[in-house]
Amino acid sequence: MVCALILALALPLQLSVDAGLFPDVLNPYYLHLLTIIGMNIILVASLNLLNGYLGEFALGHAGFMAVGAYTAALLATKALPSAAALPPVLGTFVILVVTLGGAMLMAAGIGYLIGLVTFKTVGDYLAIITLGFNMIIVNAIQNMDFVGGPRGFTGIPKNTNFLAVAVCALLTLGLLRNLIQSSFGRVWVSIRENAIAAELMGVSIARAKNWAFTIAAAFAGLAGGLWAQNQQFITPRSFDYIKTTEILVMLYLGGMASLSGSILGVVAYTLLMELLRNLLSAFAPQLAEWRMLISPLILIVIMLTRQTGLLGNREWRWLRSRQGA
Amino acid sequence: MGLRITDLTKSFGGLTAVSGFHLELGDRDLQGIIGPNGAGKTTVFNLITGVYAPDCGQIQLGEHTVSGLPSDAIARAGIARTFQNIRLFAQMTVLDNITMALHARAGYGLWEAAFRTGNFHRQEARLLAESREHLARFGLLDRQREAAGSLPYGEQRRLEIARALATGPKVLLLDEPAAGMNPREVEELIQLIQQVHRDFSLAILLIEHQLPVVMELCREVQVLDFGQTIASGAPQEVVRNPLVIEAYLGEEEAMA
């Protein structure tokens, strides 16, 4: 219901902005903000699968985003014809399916391999290892000349628009919700709650965790693929641990183990940062750089005052299970 | 044959926690292991369930040797247990604690779950019905939506036993189920275990610190002290065994 509503709004919104209708109300800036929010929802919701539901502190999400972004960029520029050479709507659709599918598969594959190594450890060690892999991925890309190395990857066609992001974000939320409210989700939460008991109920812990890790990586790859084809220019540095931290801040702001929280956290954080940016550049441009202090500050305040975030462990009705069990 | 254990031994550093432990547990037997604190009772359970790997000895479930397998494989082979310090999934609902235990028989794959296929809905409805039926049997149905961690102590114990049984085990290991219970709760627990023993086709092995529980439930017990079996047989005979009296009295003295 809510999904249908959002899609029903997204389509005319995209069309009217593309057509340049009502430039004052529906300007591309707002649409750009909504696009960023959509991509961030994919990132935060998928990280929630690991940090919220599975209860493992993973710190390398931006690394998988990078894998997805570069895979999609390569596919879009080197492997596929440009959208102009194909029939208009269908062509873009096919390009998106191929690039995003490739991005997800690549990120999932690398996530799976990293997970094999990583889930021999838990807790602090896991956090540090995932952080290490994030750095390895970013540094590896910096040393790959065929994707531009440290200069970045330029000339990516703009295949992503708000509509595509909205569809992907809703698909991500729907699929994650379905998984969380299935036997797989119950197993993941049981590992968080008591790993020893879960194991003695016959759960292969390493396997279950690696499934979650692979799925989360795939969705991070999806967000990266959308990102690359929206920004049209990517550099390895956009995916370092600072991006990971930003994803974490939104996650904790919204609350662990709650997809509703992930949505709310992303919206609140993105709007807050944009608001601050506009306010500071209007009234105190010399303080503009201080904006970046805000996100770690938010994290500290949440940890001190409200560890469950805005909506920890609670869900809005449309993200809850039908059976109400 | 349910569970057959031969010559089970485990030491930690210089300390021999269990040495030369034997057990023959028939298909529908109900046996007990008693002994003072630190006698190695829980270590025996941890060895059976693969939490620790035995130094030597063999554990057979039916025809299969399970010693040396990882814990989750042993659990799937049909050995379920409860814990001395309750280990529920505290933040999950009472219902989900049971439904989770059915994971190995979910009957659908990742894709079917992600896209909610017809098969997923059918299997999920089956899991739900099975879980509710199971909860009803243990008198926990009206608690199904509550968080497991918010239940009173006695009901948490009951839920843990229910969860272990939901996996459909051939052997159920109960680790001090009466620990921390008042006499009325202990009486209820004894009835519950008798009911489980009657209704389910499985063997039960019970660790207990409190002698009355074992006296009432088991026809055969083993007494462990310092990792060694010092006596075995019918509980009424065993408690008259001077070695057993010494082990228990010795502990009383040490505690006094």
Image (cartoon, helix red, strand yellow):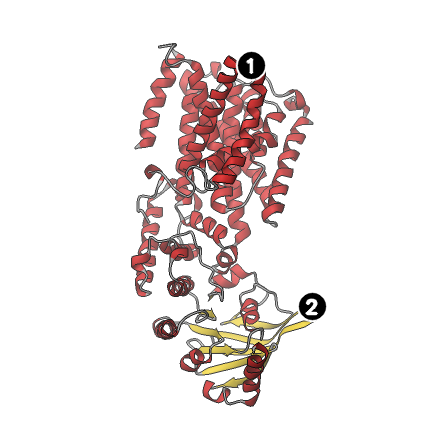
Looking at the rendered structure, the number of numbered marks drawn on it comes to 2
Up-down relation of residue B238 to residue B184 (above or below): below
- Looking at the picture, tell me which residue is in the foreground, B142 or A230: B142
**Residue type at numbered disc 2:** Gly
Tag 1's secondary structure?
helix
Q: Tell me what residue is drawn at x 34 percent, y 58 percent.
A: B131
- Looking at the picture, tell me which residue is in the foreground, B208 or B117: B208
Return the residue at label 1.
A285
**Residue type at numbered disc 1:** Pro
Return the residue at label 2.
B13
Chain letter belonging to callout 2: B
- Looking at the picture, tell me which residue is in the foreground, B205 or B4: B205
Residue B135 x/y as whole percent: 33, 61
- Crowding near pointer 2: few (<14 within 10 Å), some, many (20+)? few
Residue A321 x/y as whole percent: 34, 43
Up-down relation of residue A274 to residue B188 (above or below): above
Say the numbered circle drawn on residue A17: none
Q: Nearer the viewer, mark 2 or mark 1?
A: 1
